[in-house]
Structures are given as structure tokens and as C-alpha cells.
Amino acid sequence: MRKHLTIVGVAIALSLAAAGTDAAERKLRYLVGVTGSCTQLVVENLPHPCEGTLIQAEYDDGRVGFHFIATEPEGLVVSFSGPGHMQKAPSADVRILPVDGVIKPGIAIHATGECLYENPYAGRARIECAARSASGVGFRGRFLTDGSEPNVTDLGGGDG
């Protein structure tokens, strides 16, 4: 799985670089991979089958992204991105991240919404993201982890 995380991490970093100059200077700090069931992935109002792996990324500026991987079409990674410092904690094991953008390969879309995510170290955890562009185009991802421990890759961005 580590090789898969590295490949996805590079793809994520490249897709974020397309989002603008601030994103181009952003450094990836951590990738957290979880396994389980992707129960829904909707991209631009169209459903797509998705993989049983989800990646959470954290950047040196505090931005957080949840990256859903479609099985069809191959290579489609949809990222829900938002400012980590603005997240809310309704309970000890639940966070809500405000989403201000959705990224797919080569395209950053301004969209508003949120991601609700539970602590994957506490057992099976939900990750649910939804966002909508100003023109009404919808994006949604739902994932349930299998309860196994997350795979964390520390990339050290911003630590030196």
C-alpha cells in the first residue's frame, strides 16, 4: 500500500499545483491512507464507482484534503479541500472541515461544503464530504473505514 500512497501523493501534489500560485508553494506534510468501502462518489452530478482506499492529506499551511479515488474512469482522483484551522470538533472523535474547493485532475473548482470525518484510530470511521459549485454542480464522497489502523506517511514538508 505504501507504493500506492506515494503514487497518489504525487498525483495529488501535481493536481493541487494547478489550483494557483499559493497551492504551487504548498508542501505536503502527511498522507494518511485508510481502507474500507467507498459507498458513494459523485463528480459533477454523475456517480462513479470508487476504490476501497481513501487518502487524507495535510499541507504545511494547514490545508487538509480528502482524496477519493474512482475506479472508472481510471486515474480520476477527486479531492475535497479546506482550511484545517477552520474545522470544528462537535465531539472528541468527530471533526467537520469546511470545504472551499474541489480538485480533479488539472482543475480546481471553487465549491462550498464540508467533510465530516471520524477518528479512524477508534475503529470503523465515516468520512463524508459534500460540496457544490456556485453554478450548482454537485460533488459527494462517502467512505467507511474497515477499522484497521491508518497508514501514515510523514513527508516532512514544512519542517525545515
Image: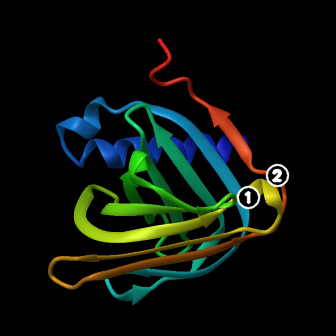
Placement of 144 over or under 29, stated as above or below: below
Taking the spot 38% from the left edge, 62% from the top edge, the residue there is 98
At label 2, counting other C-alpha atoms closer than 10 Å, the crowd grade (few under 14, some 14-19, many 20 or more) is: some
Q: Earlier in the sequence, mark 1 or mark 2?
A: 1
Taking the spot 33% from the left edge, 46% from the top edge, the residue there is 16
- Residue 127, percent across and down? 60, 69
Taking the spot 46% from the left edge, 53% from the top edge, the residue there is 65
- Residue 14, percent across and down? 36, 42
Circle 1 SS class: helix
Q: Which residue is mark 1?
A: 120
Circle 2 SS class: loop
> Which quadrant holds residue 101?
bottom left
Callout 2 amino acid: Glu
Give me the disc on residue 149: 2
- Residue 5, percent across and down? 62, 45
Task: Single out the residue that lies furthest toward the left.
Answer: 135
Placement of 37 over or under 60, stated as above or below: below
Q: Nearer the viewer, mark 1 or mark 2?
A: 1
Callout 1 amino acid: Pro
Give me the disc on residue 4: none
Taking the spot 34% from the left edge, 58% from the top edge, the residue there is 105
Q: Is residue 40 visible?
A: yes
At label 1, counting other C-alpha atoms closer than 10 Å, the crowd grade (few under 14, some 14-19, many 20 or more) is: many
Label 1 and label 2: CA atoms lie apart by: 7 Å
Task: Single out the residue that lies furthest toward the top.
Answer: 160
Labels 1 & 2 near each other (Cβ < 8 A): yes
Judging depth in this view, the residue of 64 and 109 nearest the camera is 64
Q: Is residue 1 visible?
A: no
Apparent side of residue 42 relative to residue 34 in the rendered image (left or right): left
